[in-house]
């Protein structure tokens, strides 16, 4: 169980670091992606982008 938590945490960190590059491709601005400011900080919850990337990863895994 702890391994999956670590994998999810690492995936979120990698995705967050790639977010500026992915925005140039249009990801991170899909309907369903939440972006809000709270007390001077910006928070992003890319729900739709995560679902899309998970679907693409699943298709690639099935093809391999």
Image (cartoon, rainbow, N blue to C red):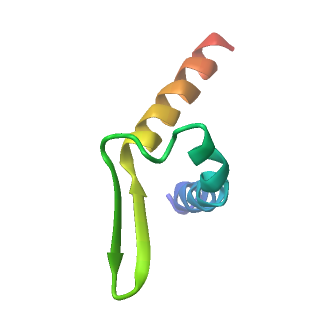
Percent position of residue 10, x then y: 63, 59
Which residue is located at x 37 percent, y 41 percent? 48
Outermost residue on the bottom side: it is 39
Does 16 appear above or below 31? below
Relative image position of residue 19 (x, y in whole percent): 60, 54
Vertical side of 44 occupied by 47: above or below? above
Looking at the rendering, which quadrant does residue 39 occupy? bottom left
Quarter where residue 12 is shown: bottom right
Residues 24 and 15: in front is 24
Instruction: Please tell me in which quadrant of the rendered image residue 43 appears.
Output: bottom left
Q: How many marks?
A: 0
Q: Could you say where residue 23 lies in the image, as x and y percent from the top left?
A: 57, 47
The answer to which of 37 and 1 lies nearer the viewer is 37
13 or 22, which lies in front?
A: 22
Residue found at x 59% / y 59% = 16
Q: Residue furthest top?
A: 63
Position of 63 with respect to 33 (left or right) is right
Identify which residue is drawn at 63% across, 11% down: 63
Q: Identify whether 40 is placed above or below 6.
A: below
Residue 46: give x, y in percent of width and height: 42, 51
Report the quarter where the C terminus lies.
top right
| Residue at x-position 33% and y-position 68% | 36
């Amino acid at each position: 169980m702890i391994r999956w938590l670590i994998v999810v945490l690492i995936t979120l960190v990698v995705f967050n670091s790639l977010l500026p590059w992915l925005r140039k491709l249009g990801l991170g601005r899909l309907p369903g992606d939440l972006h809000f400011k709270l007390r001077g900080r910006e928070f992003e919850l890319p729900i739709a982008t995560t679902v899309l990337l998970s679907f693409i990863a699943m298709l690639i895994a099935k093809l391999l």
